[in-house]
Amino acid sequence: MPAIPAAVLVFLSSAAVLVLEILAARLLAPYVGVTLEVYTAIIGTILAGIAFGSWWGGRWADRRDPRQLIGPFLVVGGALSFITIPVIDALGTGLRGAGAFTTVVLTFAAFFAPATVLTAVTPAIIKLELADLDQTGRVVGRLSAVGTAGAIIGTFVTGFILVAEVPTRPTIRVVAGFLVLLGIGTAAWLHGSRRATSMGMIVAVVVAGVFSFAARHPCDYESAYYCARIEVDPDNPSGRALWLDTLRHSYVDLDDPAHLEFTYIEWFGDVITAVAPDGASVDALHIGGGGYTMPRYLRAEHEGSTSTVLEVDPLLVELTYDELGLAPGDDIETLVGDARLTLGAVEPGTYDLVVNDAFGGVSVPWHLATREFLGQVHDATTDDAVMIANVIDYGPRDFLRSYLATTATVFDHVAVLGRTGSFGDRGTRGLGGNFVVIASDAPLPIADIEAANRRGGRGDEVLSGSDLEVFTGGAPVLTDDFAPVDQLLTPLPDA
């Protein structure tokens, strides 16, 4: 085989493996979310496929003429790429959750085989190129470098361009179809015959393609960040729930902007009622927009309030206005981008309320949970401002404890609101869920918060002062240099 076609085939097959690796996160997200565990499972699975494919492809290349292997490897790799979609959809529904085991099972079932078969192309081509043992190092080194270059280009093109511009599933299908055509053409060229690909292989490809296109798509909308869908509440025709990946992130009532559906959102309302009684206006900073539930609430219940929303995903902003009925107005401003960056664009000392409700999967993004970020939030607020933050944790609640400890290094007064009984012994499992962390440099109106909570018929528990110190129990402070958020977090038991 001439050197240039050999290099092209190695480049393209290696690039395809990394395209699949990057897109795997988006394909898995509707079922297991987007967490460190997900990326760990993907990287580990693809690396395992590359390692096994290198060994297995080399053994096959020693046993058979590589000319008979290269084309079929590409065809089979394309077919296996097609079925990553139905495999994820079929298994994901039954294994839905964010656990490490679930994530590894789904990732391995879908992506190990195509990564293995596509990687096997390289050792087969190396064997074909090794006409002179005196040039072994040169041939292996050149093709290894070309394969690495293909992997790099595949990573950059997918991460920077494809994910942002093209839906995930069509991209995978195009890559799969291209590999199949490339394999058929390569087999015919190396064999000098149009019958180089068996009828059985063609049938397998067709079946894989049919299953791929028939697979159910779990998303109504897809962005670079989320798989999103909007559901109508069967018990309330004007109710709309916004689902992002595996979680119901927001709920809005199109006819009643003051309606607060989720318990933790009602807790937000309790705190706001206490710090801004009688419908007093506030200047609020919202970290995370979702369905803009709280900006709507402030507009309806605290007339004259202003809201600045920091939202990372432009798709959610579009959905909020186009599908979730938010009326435009000068009182609500949106800054699109990562909150860690867009927070630098807000005026210091401006806001008297911060609503911190940014989530990636089931967790606060680690870089939005550190002392440094909370320091930026503090700089944006007035002297008596209040920050309220949504945190989800279960079991020993180690992440909640660390978040509270971290918040206490920035604000003078900290409290946490949760269900009665959710602040029990650290070893108690199954307790937890949503918590609302409350922080300010001014003394917190604990009694007023509890009174607002009781008026709503909830009777939840506020922890502050020495009781909070006992609950926090010397938990580590999260910093930019050390923020093991995913490891501290305990997900919903049996999820």
Image (cartoon, rainbow, N blue to C red):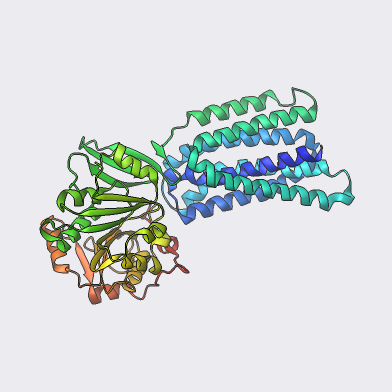
Horizontal side of residue 154 vs 329, given as left or right: right
Q: Residue at x 69, y 36 (%)?
A: 73
In percent of width and height, residue 350 lies at 27, 63
Q: Is residue 469 above or below residue 258?
A: below
Q: Is residue 477 above or below residue 242?
A: below
Q: Which of the 4 image quarters holds residue 191?
A: top right
Q: Residue at x 17, y 42 (%)?
A: 256
Horizontal side of residue 385 vs 77, given as left or right: left
Horizontal side of residue 491 vs 139, given as left or right: left
In percent of width and height, residue 96 lies at 41, 45
In percent of width and height, residue 405 lies at 34, 72
Q: Can you see residue 313? A: yes
Q: Which of the 4 image quarters holds residue 380?
A: bottom left
Horizontal side of residue 313 vs 464, given as left or right: right
In percent of width and height, residue 401 lies at 34, 68
Q: Can you see residue 397? A: no
Q: Is residue 21 above or below residue 409?
A: above
Q: Nearer the viewer, residue 111 or 328?
A: 328
Q: Quadrant of the N terminus?
A: top right
Q: Residue at x 36, y 70 (%)?
A: 406
